[in-house]
Amino acid sequence: MTKEEFSRLAAQGPVLLDGATGSNLRAAGMPVGVSSELWVLEHPQVLLDLQRAYAEAGSRIIMAPTFSANRTGLKNFGLEERLGELNAALVALSKEAAGDRVLVAGDLSTLGRPLEPVGDMPYSEAYDTYREQMEALGSAGADLFALETLMGAEEAAAALDAAADFGLPVMVSFSVEADGGVIFGGTVWEAAAMAQELGASAVGVNCSVGPDQLESVIRSVRAAVEIPVIAKPNAGLPVMDERGQAHYSMGPEDFARHMEALVKAGAGIVGGCCGTTPAYVRQLAKVLGRQLVSD
C-alpha cells in the first residue's frame, strides 16, 4: 500500500481498526511470562479465529501480532536470532486471516527505554532495532506499519527515520495520561506534530485510558496536525480479580458511545486496545454506521 492510497482511504470517512490482541490471547489460555509471538505460532487457530472475527465485525485494518518481535523484546526469550522467521510467519498468519479486503499492519512498539538525552538508549540503537524489524515486516508483505504504545517523541523519531526508505504508510500512536502527557515527557500534540513532520501518515493515541477520558486530548491532536488522527483506547479502567486477571470497566455499548464522541472530536482512524473484543468493534461499526469506510 502506498502513502497516497492510505490517504485516499482515510479521506473517505472513519477507518475501523481491530481491537485488542494480547488480552484476548490471555483469555484464550496464553500464560503470563511467555513469548506471545512464539505462543501464537504454536496455537495459530486462536489468532486466526480472533482476527477473522475482527474482519467480520468491520475492521478495515488488523495488526499482525508482532508488537514486541524486535531484537530487544525477543532477546528476553532467547529468540532474537529467529527475528526474521517469526515476523514473517506472524504476518503470513494475519494475512491468511485478513483475506482480500482487510489490510495487515506490521505492528511495532516502544523499546521501553527513553532515548538520550532523556534516558540512556542511543538514537542509533533505537534506529537499528526498528529498521531490522521493519525490514522483516516489509519483506513479509505487511501493507503498512503501525507504531503503537510509544512512550516518547524521540523513539517515534527514530522509528520514522527507520521507516523512511520503505515507502509504506506509518501510523503512529502514543500511550498518554488523561491530560495528554506522554510517558517519557512532553505532550502528545507536540509529539504528533513532530511525527507529521517526519512523515507519519496518521498519528494519535492508543492504550492508556478509556475513551471517556480522551475527548480533549483528541481535539488537541486534531488541532496540531493535518493528517488523520488515531484513537484506539482501552475498554475503560482495569480491575484485577483474585487470579490476577484484568477485567475492564466499559462494555461494548458504552465504549462505542464514547468513541462516537472521539470521532466528532476529530478522530478518523478508530479501534480498541486492551480489554476490547470483536463485540466492541461490531458495536462501534453499528454506532458509526454509514460513516465507515467499507471498500
Image (cartoon, grey):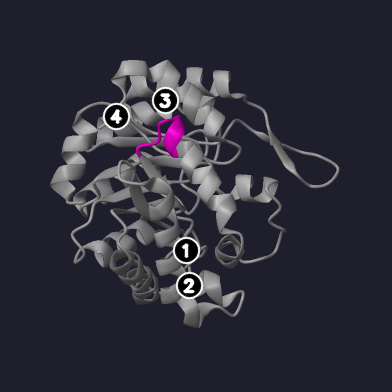
Q: Earlier in the sequence, mark 4 or mark 2?
A: 2
**Place of residue 72 in the rendered image (x, y in percent of width and height, measured from the top left):** 50, 73
**Place of residue 45 in the rendered image (x, y in percent of width and height, measured from the top left):** 57, 53
Q: Earlier in the sequence, mark 3 or mark 2?
A: 2
Q: Are the residues at dot 2 and dot 1 in contact (C-beta closer than 8 Å)? A: yes
- Secondary structure at badge 1 equals loop
Q: Is 197 placed above or below 154 here? A: above
Name the kind of residue labelled 1 in the image: Pro
Residue at point 47%, 63% (across, down) = 114
Q: Residues within 10 Å of mark 3 (few under 14, many from 20)?
A: some
The image quarter containing residue 231 is: top left
The residue carrying mark 4 is 294
- Secondary structure at badge 3 equals helix
Residue at point 44%, 34% (across, down) = 56
Name the mark nearer the viewer: 1 or 4.
4
Name the mark nearer the viewer: 4 or 2.
4
